[in-house]
Amino acid sequence: MIPVCRIEDLPVGESLRITVDDHTPAIAVFHAEDGGFYAVDDLCSHQDASLSDGFVEGCYVECPLHAALFDLRTGAPSCLPARRPVRTHDVTVLDGMVHVRPAVREEAVA
């Protein structure tokens, strides 16, 4: 697991981008309006746009480029122009610290 930040350092409706290593895509970590913490691949599946720059609406993130919505819980797109999901990552909060466990590439949904 990768320590990301303290829970108070990521307000509701905000996100941040983390880089794991040179071989793993960046991950966007969100504090959704339901109070939950979620993580997805930072790159929109429709076009090269950073989802961490997007807008959180409930448990969804809106891509800042073409307004595609992705469910932060499942990675599934809920509207066009995105057709493919983004990969999700496990998030755990331990002792007030947000941690992300990056998914293995094979777990990505096609």
Image: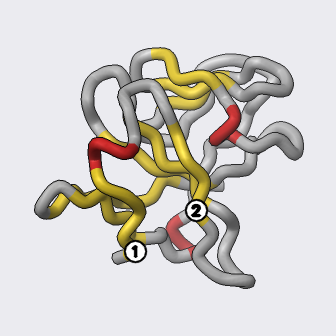
Distance of mark 1 from mark 2, alpha carbons? 10 Å
Q: Which residue is at 37% across, 58% downward? A: 5
Q: Are marks 1 and 2 in contact (CB under 8 Å)?
A: yes
Image position of 78 (left or right of 12) = right
Q: Earlier in the sequence, mark 1 or mark 2?
A: 1
Query: Most extreme residue toward the front, as rendered?
Result: 9
In the image, residue 16 above or below residue 57: below
Q: Disc 1 on helix, strand or loop? A: strand
Which residue is denoted by mark 1 in the rendering?
2
Q: Which residue is at 45% across, 40% downward? A: 30
Q: Which residue is at 49% across, 16% downward? A: 57
Q: Amino acid at mark 2?
A: Ile
Residue 67 or residue 4, whichever sits in front? 4
Q: Amino acid at mark 1?
A: Ile
Which residue is denoted by mark 2 in the rendering?
18
* Quadrant of residue 23 within the rendered picture: bottom right
In the image, residue 92 above or below residue 21: above
The x and y percentages for residue 14 are 49, 32
* Quadrant of residue 78 within the rendered picture: top right
The x and y percentages for residue 93 are 21, 56
The x and y percentages for residue 49 are 82, 41
Dot 1 alpha-carbon crowd within 10 angstroms: few under 14, some 14 to 19, many 20 or more = few
Q: Disc 2 on helix, strand or loop? A: strand
Dividing the image into 4 quarters, which one contains the N terminus? bottom left
Which numbered tag is attached to residue 46? none
The x and y percentages for residue 64 are 77, 26
Dividing the image into 4 quarters, which one contains the C terminus? bottom right
